Amino acid sequence: MKLDEFRAMSPEDLKKQIEEAHQEQFNLRFRLSTRQLVNHREIPRVKKKIARLETLLTEKKLGIR
């Protein structure tokens, strides 16, 4: 999803997306430790996604944008 699509979401939807991203990160780390992960660049991608979502959630709480 693009950043504009995330900005249009409600805080509850953002929290749900954050939970899903955390679950995805857990699964990727698990696959990495069992040497089943093919693309190692997926882990930083998910970390950045979580950071973006949490930043947007904080912006909504503070009324920025």
Image (tube, grey):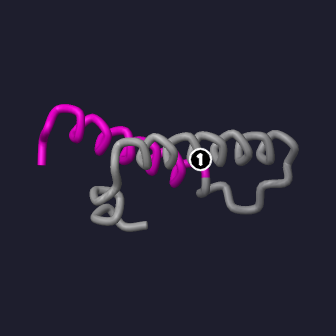
Q: Residue at x 66, y 55 (%)?
A: 40
Residue found at x 34% / y 49% = 10
Magenta stretch contains residue 56: yes
What residue span does the magenta drawing correspond to?
43-65
40 is within the stretch colored magenta: no
Q: Position of residue 53 (x, y in %)?
A: 38, 46
Disc tally is 1
Mark 1: few/some/many CA within 10 Å (<14, 14-19, 20+): few
Kindly identify which residue carries mark 1.
20
Q: Secondary structure at mark 1?
A: helix
Q: Name which residue lies at 30% across and 40% down.
A: 55
39 displayed left or right of 12: right
Residue 32 lies, in percent from the top left, at: 77, 45
Residue at image point 50% right, 49% down: 17
Left or right of 9: which side holds 35? right
The three-letter code of the residue at mark 1 reads Glu
Depicted 26 relative to depicted 10: above or below: above
